[in-house]
Image (cartoon, rainbow, N blue to C red):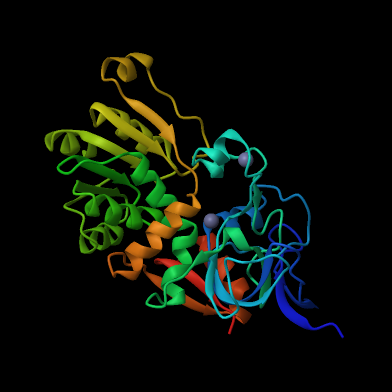
Amino acid sequence: MTDYMKSARMVGVKAPLELVDVPIPEPGPGEVLVKIEVCGLCHSDLHFWLGEHPLPELPTTLGHEGIGTVVKLGAGVENLTTGMRVGIGYVYDTCGACRECLTGYETHCASVACTGVDAQGCFAEYTVLRANWATVIPDTLEPVDAAPLLCAGVAAYSATRKAALQPGELAVVFGSGGLGSYAIQFAKLSGATVVAVDLAHEKLEHALSLGADYAIEADGNAIDQIRGLGGADASFNFAPSTASWRQMIESAAARCRLVLISLPHEDLRFNAAEVIESGLRIFGSADGTRQELRQLMQLASGGKIRSVVESVPFMQINDAFERLAVGSVQGRLVINMQ
Ligand SMILES: [Zn+2]
Ligand SMILES: [Zn+2]
């Protein structure tokens, strides 16, 4: 007899998700079945729903910040047991054999498959997960606090880690919303002096409460203020605008690392001389690896990372998408499946 579960399925661009009964999937070899407790709603889910990133096929079930309990093991699974609480992130699987996979850059694998895109996601009562892609969630961490770490948190963590911040350096975080609020905390933990830049006054207040040393309004004389502090040794762009890009370039100290994470709609421009003469380094960062997720969960379980989350019942998932689309959300929305 087939057992059924509720699944929120995306059936078309900007169309309400349909809450339908579908068969509970069977875990294949190397896979586990997970009963989902909560799943964070990420901006990538919104981009998919708005049609900004086309999906290979519809209907699909989005959601890639899932936390749940392993309830069934597929053949050959040895690293997990039933009853373990695991996290399900954006990367569903990679080839495991290419240069990127073998050198710690697995998120750049050319054969990457993604949760909610190439495989069913976590806005459902159950989902199937590749066992060797499970992130074990410490018992001391609340599921709602852990969920946003699986994509937003680890993306910010990976970006700050790649910047190799040294104690006493000046780290400037452009955009203090979801990812930026995590980056502020990671930069602070590395011993840097942290500057938050944002247009919204309440986000700057929040940045200070998370440990930022300075909060600067983006539309004021941000460049002069950052230069007055000695210039940025590392800048992180979580604000998808060309205006913040100019500010990053012009507030950079010599040998500044400029890290791009969010996607602006327009091309970013720079003059080669200003990059060459100051020895600037510009690079991108996307998502984070399994090892970075492990490190992040350890940090968070020690109480060193704060998430601002709002729990939303599963039946109100369409309201959550609408609210995120109009930008009326403080912190991260986490859908509760229970
Ligand atoms: Zn995401
Ligand atoms: Zn690979």
Inspect this view and state whether residue 89 appears.
Answer: yes
Inspect this view and state whether residue 327 appears.
Answer: no
Please provide percent x and percent y for residue 124: 67, 74
| Of residues 308 and 190, the one drawn nearer to the viewer in this rendering | 190
Residue at the spot 24% in from the left edge and 32% down from the top edge: 251
Counting the numbered discs, the total is: 0
Residue at the spot 50% in from the left edge and 30% down from the top edge: 267
Residue 89 position (above or below residue 277): below
| Of residues 132 and 193, the one drawn nearer to the viewer in this rendering | 132
**Quarter occupied by residue 26:** bottom right
Q: Quadrant of the image for the N terminus?
A: bottom right
Please provide percent x and percent y for residue 199: 32, 50
Q: Is residue 127 left or right of residue 159?
A: right
| Of residues 129 and 306, the one drawn nearer to the viewer in this rendering | 129
Residue at the spot 43% in from the left edge and 25% down from the top edge: 269
Q: Quadrant of the image for the C terminus?
A: bottom right
The quadrant of the rendered image in which ligand 2 is seen is top right
Q: Is residue 85 left or right of residue 303?
A: right
Outermost residue, right side = 1
Q: Is residue 257 left or right of residue 105?
A: left
Residue 263 position (above or below residue 150): above
Residue 240 position (above or below residue 323): above
Please provide percent x and percent y for residue 95: 66, 44
Please provide percent x and percent y for residue 255: 26, 26
